[in-house]
């Protein structure tokens, strides 16, 4: 599979900017992802995330990008691109099936501003246009009401619950699954 290219120019709506991660983002990436909500909903391991986990993410992200499997982007303030607000990714890219998944997390200092919704709209539009996917999937825990609202604001349709879907924090967790097809993306 071919490597996934970073969007060039980076994706932006004038408020959020989706750009490649930089080495000097590490402290913000750790601080944002180490937050209680990110750990509750997005970190599957029992032990908390460490700075070493974040440092290792750069190499894992690049290997997955070069393999054509995923693309992980920093979500930054468009006016001050050095300020990281979170992350957005397209992953589980199955080019032959024209399918992929999307995900995101938002740092506590950026919540309540529509950052996740804006980021998801940009990334979904890019996935349809550039990756030519015909189906985007989004998953979240059944108790993650905020993430479900973001998905629905963008036009994703809730398809159901995958019971005992993934290993999560030493047990198994159910997962809500949403999908978005071409022409369904809501831009407002």
Image: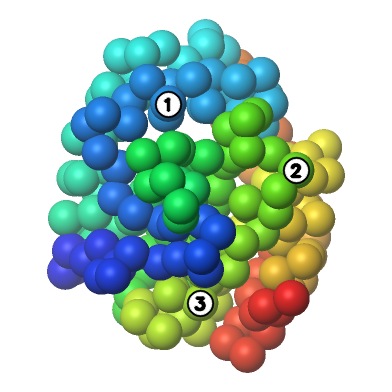
Asked if residue 171 shows in the view, the reply is: no
- Residue in the foreground of this view, choosing between 120 and 9: 9
Residue contact at pointers 2 and 3, CB within 8 angstroms: no
Q: Picture coordinates of residue 158 (x, y %)?
A: 78, 65
Q: Residue at 29% of width from left, 50% of height from top?
A: 20
Residue at the far front in the pictured view = 79
Answer left or right for 57 relative to 117.
left
Relative horizontal placement of residue 19, taking residue 49 as reference (left or right)? left
Residue at the spot 55% in from the left edge and 47% down from the top edge: 104
In the visual, does 134 lie left or right of 156? left
Badge 2, how many Cα within 10 Å: few under 14, some, many 20+?
few
Cα distance in 3D space between marks 2 and 3: 22 Å
Dot 1 crowding, Cα within 10 Å, few <14, some 14–19, many 20+:
some
Q: Earlier in the sequence, mark 1 or mark 2?
A: 1
- The numbered mark, 1 or 3, whose residue comes first in the sequence reads 1
Q: Residue 120's quadrant in the figure?
A: bottom right
Q: Nearer the viewer, residue 23 or 4?
A: 23
- 58 is higher (above) or lower (below) than 142: above
Residue at point 44%, 37% (across, down): 83
Instruction: Point out which mark residue 125 bears.
Output: 3
Q: Label 2: which residue?
A: 112
Identify the secondary structure beneath mark 2: loop
Is 41 positioned to the left or the right of 129 in the image?
A: right
Residue at position x 77%, y 66% in the image = 153
Render colour scheme: rainbow
Q: Residue 82: where, in percent of width, then height? A: 36, 39
What SS does tag 1 mark?
helix
Q: Is residue 103 visible?
A: yes
Disc on res. 179: none
Q: Which residue is tagged 1?
A: 28
Q: Nearer the viewer, mark 1 or mark 3?
A: 1
């Amino acid at each position: 599979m071919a490597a996934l290219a970073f969007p060039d120019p980076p994706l932006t709506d004038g408020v959020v900017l989706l750009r490649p991660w930089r080495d000097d983002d590490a402290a913000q990436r750790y601080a944002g992802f180490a937050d209680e909500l990110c750990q509750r909903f997005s970190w599957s391991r029992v032990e908390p995330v460490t700075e070493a986990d974040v440092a290792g993410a750069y190499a894992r992200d690049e290997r997955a990008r070069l393999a054509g499997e995923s693309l992980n982007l920093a979500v930054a303030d468009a006016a001050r691109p050095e300020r990281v607000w979170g992350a957005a990714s397209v992953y589980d890219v199955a080019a032959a099936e024209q399918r992929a998944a999307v995900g995101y997390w938002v740092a506590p200092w950026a919540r309540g501003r529509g950052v996740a919704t804006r980021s998801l709209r940009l990334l979904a539009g890019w996935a349809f246009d550039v990756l030519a996917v015909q189906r985007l999937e989004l998953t979240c825990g059944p108790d993650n009401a905020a993430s479900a609202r973001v998905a629905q604001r963008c036009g994703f349709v809730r398809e159901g619950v995958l019971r005992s879907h993934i290993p999560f924090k030493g047990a198994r967790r159910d997962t809500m699954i949403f999908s978005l097809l071409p022409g369904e993306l809501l831009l407002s």
